[in-house]
Each structure stands twice: as C-alpha cells, then as structure tokens.
Amino acid sequence: MKKILSATVVICLIFASCKNSKDGNAEMDRFIDDLMSKMTLEEKIGQLNLPTIGFDITGPVLSKDVEQKIEEGLTGGVFNTFTPQAMLKLQEIAITKTRLKIPLLFGYDVIHGHKTIFPIPLGLSASWDTALIRSTARAAALEASADGLNWVFSPMVDIARDPRWGRVSEGAGEDAFLGSAVARAMVEGYQDGCLRKNTSVMACVKHFALYGAAEAGRDYNTVDMSEVKMYNEYLPPYKAAIDAGVGSLMASFNTVNGIPATCNTRLLTDLLRRQWNFKGVVVSDYTAIAELENHGLGNRQEVSALSINAGTDMDMVSEYYLTQLPALVREGKVKESVIDIACRRILEAKYKLGLFDDPYRGVSQERADKEIMSADKLALSKEAAIKSMVLLKNNGVLPLSKDKKILFTGPLADDHRNLIGNWSGAGDSKKSVSLWEALLKERTYMYAKGCNLTDDKTLIDKLNPHDGQIVPDDKTPQELLQEAVKMARSADVVVAVLGEPFGMGGEAASRSNIGLLENQKTLLAELKKTGKPIVLVLMNSRPLTLEWEDKNMDAILETWYSGTMAGEAIKDVLFGNAEPEGRLTITFPRNTGQIPIYYSYLNTGRPDDENQKYTSKYLDCPNTPLYPFGYGLSYTQFEISPVTLSDTTLAENGSLEATVTLTNKGTRRGTETVQLYIRDLTGSISRPVKELKGFEKVTLEPNESRQITFTVTPEILKFYNASLQYTVEQGDFNIYIGNSSATENKTAFTYKP
Ligand code: GLC
C-alpha cells in the first residue's frame, strides 16, 4: 500500500508542477521562499554563477577551481561536461558538501543531437518537417538527459541573411515564419511538455537578440536595425520559443542599436519580461558580461551592475557576478531585491526540473548505454539526413545506376569528422558512416581522393588548433589531381564530394569569400576537362557562391553536414533509393556582392527593370539569387495548378480558402513542399514583395493529384506598423502558392473589415 501511495504522490507532484497549476506554483513558491530565507547574499549570488568545466572548450577562457566553488555554494550550474560519472560526482558535492544542498544545473551545447548527430540545424530546417525536427530534439533530450545533462543551449533561432556569418549553420535560415515553426518544434522536443520528467531537458532559446544580423557577416559584430524590421523579421522566432514554454534564454554578444544585448534593458526587461511575460532564466553568453568592458560600457563593477539590472540572471564564465555583486549590493549600487529575483528564477528552473526531489534524475550508466546511439535514433538520423538534402541541379544524371563505372572523388568522400559538422562536441565521428564506407557495403566503385580539404596553410593553422583535423595527404596535390583525372577518364560518371572543413562554419568562422576552396575548384575544373558527367555533392555550413559549378556540373546535391548516418543517406539519395525532398531555408547568392539577399525584400521606388537605367539593380549581376528561398528539385516533376479562392473578399472575422491541385507528372514517387506566400500591396509602411505564411509537404505517386488548401485569415496578414502595433490593414493582397519563393502562381483578394 505504501508503495502505491508514494507513486501516487509523485504523479500528483509531476502533474502539479508540469501543468503550472495554481497549487503547483504555490507549492513551488512556498518551497523557494523558505529556501531563500536561509540563503546568505553570497549563496544567492553563487546561484548566478555558471562556470565551464570538462572536456569541451567553447570560448576564449576557462573557469578555475570549479569543484571548490561548488563546495562553497558559489555555483548555480556547470556546462561543457557530461557523462553519468561526471554529473553524479559533481552533483554529489553540491548536495552533500554545501550548506544548503542546492543541486546544480548541467548544461551543454546540444545543437543538432547529443551523441547521435543529426544534420546541422540549417540542414534540418530544409526538411520543412516540424514533426521530424521535434523528433530529433526529443531524441537529443533522451540521450543528453541519460548522459547527466538537464539543460541544453538550444534552439538557436537567430534569423540570418548573410552567409558570410558562420553561424547561419546553427539556425533555420532567413525567414521569421519558418524559423518560428522550427523554434516551437525544438522547444517541444527538448522539454516534452514537462521539465520534471527525467527524460526532459530545459531548452535555452538563443541568441537574444538579432545576432544573425551582425554587420558584414562578421561574428560578434554590431547590429543596428529599426524596431519595425526587428519586430516583423527577426524577433518572431524568439517569441515562438517563449510561447512554447522555453525555460531559459541566452543573451547575445552583439550590440542592438548601440547597447550590448547583455545589458540591454529594452530587450531583457521591457520586451522580454513586460511585453512577452517571459518567466524563465536569462543566461549571458560566454564571458559576455566581462566583454561589456570591450564594448566600452564601463569597468567590471559598472558592467556587472548594468548587466544584472538589465535582466541577465546568470553569468556564464566571466565570474563578474561572483566577484563584483557582493560589494555592489553592500554599497547600495545594486538592490538585493534584484539579486533575489535572479536567484529565484534559477531556483524555479531547478524546482521545475525536479532537481530538489531527485538531483540525479535517475541517471545511470545502464540508462545511458540503452539510450545512446540506439538503433531507432540512428534510423532517425538517417531519415533526417535524407529529408534535409536539397537537390540544386540535375540534368538527368541523377539518380545514378549501379551498373555504371562511377568514380567517387573529393576529400569528403571518405571523411568522418566533417560529416557531423560544428557543435557536435559529444558526437563520436569515428562512429559516423562516410559515403565511401556506405558504398563499399554494396560493391566497389572507383575512388581517388582528388585533393586535400584545403592546401591553404594559413587556414589549416587557424582551424587545426580547434579540432580542425585537416591532415594533408602524403601524396602531393599534383599526384592527387593526376590520379583522379586519370581515373575519371575511364569512368562513366564522376561524383565529387567537396565542401568546407567543418571549422569554417559555426562560431568565429566568418568568411569574406564563400566559394569552394581554390584547390577544390581546381579539381572540378580538371575533371570537367575530361568531358565526363559530374555530380557535385556538397558538405558545408552555409550557402556557397556556385555560379561556375551551376554552369558546369551536371548535378549538385546540397547535403550540409548531415550527421552520423550521412554516408548511408547520401548513398540512398544518389542511387534513388530515397528521393531528395529538401527545400532551401536560406537564399544562395550568385556572389558575395549581392549580400544581404533574401526573398522578402521591399520593392523600392525603382524596382529592377532591365529596360530602365534608373532602377534598383547592379551593372554586373542580376538581382535574382542563384537559388531562391524555398527552392529544391525532386527526381520527379510536379505541377501546381493556378490558385483558386473561395472568395475574393476577406472580412474582419472571416476566412477564405486558397486551393491548388498538385500533380506528380513524373515517373517516380516524390515529395513537394507547397508554399503559401502573401503580398500586402498597400500599407502604412512599405511591405515585402512576399512573405511566407504557410507550407505543406505532400508525397504523391506518379500521376497522382491532390488538392492542397490553405485557410487565409486576417491573423496571418498582421504585421507591426510604424507604431509597433500588431495590426492588419484594409486593402488588396496577392496570394501565391508555389514550390519556392520565386513562384508567380498568384491570385488576389481584398481584406475589408
Ligand atoms: C558560445 C556560443 C553559445 C554557446 C555558449 C556555451 O560562445 O555563443 O552559442 O551556447 O558559448 O558554449
């Protein structure tokens, strides 16, 4: 009877704390009030301290004496460590040796999987499959929580329209609507509706805010943007994560309109707390509080006060809170009530995670062994990889047939480390499957490395100290090239697997030139001279400038870094065992000069017109991108009928239906992502020429047709006007339904309230 009773009590506790029911919060408030009444000022400030400890390095400096600080009650959590052993050891110190036995948070950058690595987020977003994306976050949470973690610094939702910025790889591309859908899915996957479950982890939406708009695509650089643009185009994904219940948020390194996000009261208090009612924890980015001195905001005392008063609760690594806040409070420069609010938020997070009941959250090596890289997660990784790939060009050379003589070449054809990309610290690249390995499971093809990943010594010297693992081949570049060209001459078709070393993407990895590396271009040019059909398979962090490749290759398959099962997935797509179904979530420019370039641009007063001199255009390049947002090919051909509307007038509380018929006109099954865009033709501010407002993935057999209907309501027409009111205005709208943002398949309606 006792056993049943205790189980019932636990279930009620979980229900109460999960459902945020009134009595659940009242119970939590009572518990935390009681705990905080016992805490000294130093212990409260200790909860605001987040040092790095363990085997991963994700910033410029490392924390010291962490175990001692844990024992002294001067640490609220740690990050960059995992495994059951590490967590059990450190948590035991916290709950047995400290005065108040407050458990620790254990955080880590679980960005696209924990041990089972999925495609980089930019790739995952190209699946346009929110259920799949949610599943990958759920799988990551199962592995991470089994490995002792209870906090993940994900999802990164920064809208980015400048592929020079290496961190475009970590987000969901350029669009607020799609980015919001991905943000929701990731938070739901990680938190699973209830943080108290020991298979849930607290998510952390980042980097707040506008980090992806860094000037010149240079990491950490200045961001300056009108609030209208901010609210309409960059803030929605953060808000979506908050509305999905994200438990924490990370402030970004950059300034926003002159004030660093870390101490930006408008962002962290006025917007986040007062307008959006965010109740979770705000953590700084790595040493960002200390870096306020570099921003010129004052000395360490002054920047510590600015940051805590603006609303940054937790100090990642700089330890300025630990060293400066006690005196600031005693000198009356910071109110103790401000410390109390920050401390309470962190204790609430721990309470919601159930850490006061079960600090170890049922972690054990057995559970980790069962969860980590389980067959179902590996299968999910392969499925995600397949669905993330984008076929950019195909003149019919794909899918390949197995009876052809095929040369596989390129430094990434038989590579393991780059497959799992950046931010895969817990991943084991030795367990990733290279394309060549996957091929060899079936039969032998021809293989020649063709070239090194790069011959640029300066680049190698920059990347290798940070796990770059770029090891030039024993053969000279000339020998590698000659060997590949000689083999190509006897092949029916060549598959060149090229791209960026993974260290050219992610943090502190901006590029001023985003083409293929020179030695790889040389390989392609020499292979082209053989006259053989060439399939270019890309592995990269960002959109690349591919004008020459687009002209000269017979097919181009964008695979991003597609994770642990990349090789199997790429093989299946190349040979047609799986269909490519990815669609771009970020524009591919023709050249760097076009940047920033994105589909939802404003028309300007002199829209591009090649017959008119005085219009908005370049003398040396079209305005259009090489590949637009939403673009991707299939192995089959789809046709989308003209758009029909249930009505041409939309009333204030009404809705209308926009319908097309999608038909598979080809000979193979295929999946299309049907996309709905609107254009507000007249507004109180200039409105974009297109805005994504809906999408649906549809799989059809050959000759199969299906009606796709989108419901249009006044809600989806809303935008922030010049006074930042979220509103819809009367007037005419175009509605587009097509297979990319370049579609001109449109009709019109009027909104008449
Ligand atoms: C890094 C990144 C951030 C990451 C954090 C902890 O500097 O900006 O995305 O979560 O530090 O590793």
Image (spheres, rainbow, N blue to C red):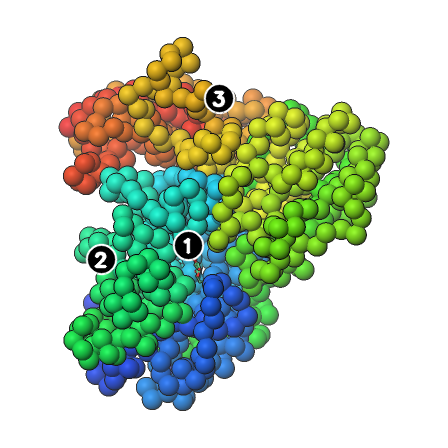
Gap between marks 2 and 3 measured at Cα: 44 Å
Q: Which mark is residue 155?
A: 1
For residue 343, side relative to residue 286 (left or right): left
The answer to whether residue 345 is left or right of residue 450 is: left
Mark 1–mark 2 contact, CB under 8 Å? Answer: no
> Total number of numbered labels?
3
Helix, strand, or loop for circle 3? loop
- The quadrant the C terminus occupies is top left
**Mark 2 highlights which residue?**
265
- Marks 1/3 in contact by CB < 8 Å: the verdict is no
Look at the numbered disc 1 and say if its residue's Cβ is closer than 8 Å to ligand 1: no
User: Which residue ends up furthest to the top in the rendered image?
Assistant: 611
**Marks 2 and 3 close (CB-CB < 8 Å):** no
**Element at badge 1?**
loop
Residue 382 visible in the snapshot: no
> Going 65% across and 39% down the picture, which residue do you hit?
518
Task: Look at the picture and state if 742 lies above or below 388.
Answer: above
Quadrant including the N terminus: bottom left
For residue 115, above or below residue 85: above
Amino acid carrying label 1: it is Pro
Mark earlier in primary sequence (1, 3):
1
Residue 184 image position (x, y, % from top left): 37, 50
Nearer to us in this view, 566 or 402:
566
* Residue kind at label 2, given as amino acid type: Thr
The residue mark sitting in front, 1 or 3, is: 3
Residue for point 36% across, 56% down: 252
Residue name at image x 84 percent, y 31 percent:
490
Please name the residue that numbered disc 3 is placed on.
Answer: 620
Mark 3 crowd level (few <14, some 14–19, many ≥20, 10 Å Cα): few
Cα separation between marks 1 and 2: 23 Å
Secondary structure state at the residue bearing disc 2: helix
